[in-house]
C-alpha cells in the first residue's frame, strides 16, 4: 500500500510493481502516471485519506506524506501494533524498514542505503553507479551469464564450475574516486581551524 499520489509515490509504486507486488494507492488525488496505472488496472486506487483499517492484511505500507508528523507517528504506532512493515519517506524515525536506492544495469542490481539519514546522497550514488556500469558492463555481464550456462551444461563437477567462473572474472576491477561537495569541504576546514 502506498499513501500519497505525487511523484514520490509514483516512484515507489513503480518499484513495487517491478518486484511483482500488488499495489493499492490511497490518496484523494493522483499524478498523471498513477492515473494511467489505475486506468489500466495495474494498481488499485482508493480516492480518500488513509484509515487504520486499510492496513489490515498489508505486508508493507509506504507513507510518502511527510507534512503531518502526528499522522506519521500514529501510523508508526499502528505498524508496531498490527505488525506490518512501514516505510515513511524521509522519516527514518517513523519507519520499520528502509527502501534502498537501486542502481540497475542489465542483470546488475546494486542496492544503496544510508539507513535513511541521507536519501538524496543514496539517489546521487545510484545515478553515478548507473553511469559507471555502462553498456559495456552490461555486455560483460551477459557474456558471464552465457559462460555460466555453458559451464553448467558441460561440467558436472561443482568445484570445476566454480573455478571456471572465477577464472572468467579474474582481472575485473572496480576503481573509483569520491569528489566531495564544496559545502562539506568548507565545513571540514572550519572544524579543523
Image (cartoon, rainbow, N blue to C red):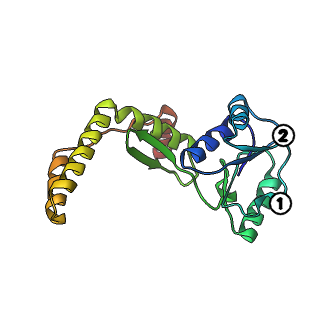
- Which is more toward the observer, 181 or 192? 181
Q: Residue at x 17, y 47 (%)?
A: 168
* Residue 80, percent from left and from top: 72, 68
* Residue 52, percent from left and from top: 83, 60
Q: Which residue is mark 1?
A: 52
**Secondary structure found at label 2:** loop
Q: Earlier in the sequence, mark 2 or mark 1?
A: 2
- Residue 13 appears left or right of 132: right
Vertical relation: 104 (above or below) 91 = above
Q: Are marks 2 and 1 in contact (CB under 8 Å)?
A: no
- Which is more toward the observer, 90 or 162? 162
Q: Residue at x 27, y 42 (%)?
A: 174
Q: Gap between marks 2 and 1, in whole Å?
A: 16 Å
Q: How many marks?
A: 2
* Residue 84, percent from left and from top: 68, 64
Q: Which residue is mark 2?
A: 28
**Label 1: how many Cα within 10 Å (few below 14, some 14–19, many 20+):** few
* Residue 121, percent from left and from top: 52, 41
**Secondary structure found at label 1:** helix
Residue 171 appears anywhere in the view: yes
Q: Residue at x 67, y 48 (%)?
A: 23
- Residue 25 appears left or right of 189: right
**Label 2: how many Cα within 10 Å (few below 14, some 14–19, many 20+):** some
Figure quadrant of residue 106: top left
Q: Residue at x 25, y 38 (%)?
A: 140
Disc assigned to residue 158: none
- Residue most extreme to the front: 153
Vertical relation: 67 (above or below) 136 = below
Residue 175 appears anywhere in the view: no
- Residue 89 appears left or right of 128: right
Amino acid at each position: 500500500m502506498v499513501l500519497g499520489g505525487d511523484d514520490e509515490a509514483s516512484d515507489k509504486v513503480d518499484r513495487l510493481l517491478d518486484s511483482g507486488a500488488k499495489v493499492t494507492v490511497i490518496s484523494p488525488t493522483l499524478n498523471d502516471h498513477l492515473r494511467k496505472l489505475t486506468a489500466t488496472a495495474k494498481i488499485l486506487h482508493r480516492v480518500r485519506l488513509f484509515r487504520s483499517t486499510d492496513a489490515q492484511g498489508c505486508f508493507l505500507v509506504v507513507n510518502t506524506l511527510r507534512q503531518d508528523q502526528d499522522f506519521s507517528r500514529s501510523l508508526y504506532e499502528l505498524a508496531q501494533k498490527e505488525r506490518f512493515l512501514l516505510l515513511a519517506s524521509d522519516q527514518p524515525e517513523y519507519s520499520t524498514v528502509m527502501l534502498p536506492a537501486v542502481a540497475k544495469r542489465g542483470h546488475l542490481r546494486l542496492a544503496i542505503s544510508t539507513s535513511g539519514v541521507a536519501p538524496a546522497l543514496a539517489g546521487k550514488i545510484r545515478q553515478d553507479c548507473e553511469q559507471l556500469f555502462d553498456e559495456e558492463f552490461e555486455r560483460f555481464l551477459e557474456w558471464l551469464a552465457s559462460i555460466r550456462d555453458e559451464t553448467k551444461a558441460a561440467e558436472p563437477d561443482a568445484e570445476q564450475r566454480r573455478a571456471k567462473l572465477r577464472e572468467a572474472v579474474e582481472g575485473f576491477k572496480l576503481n573509483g574516486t569520491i569528489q566531495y561537495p564544496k559545502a562539506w569541504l568548507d565545513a571540514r576546514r572550519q572544524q579543523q581551524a
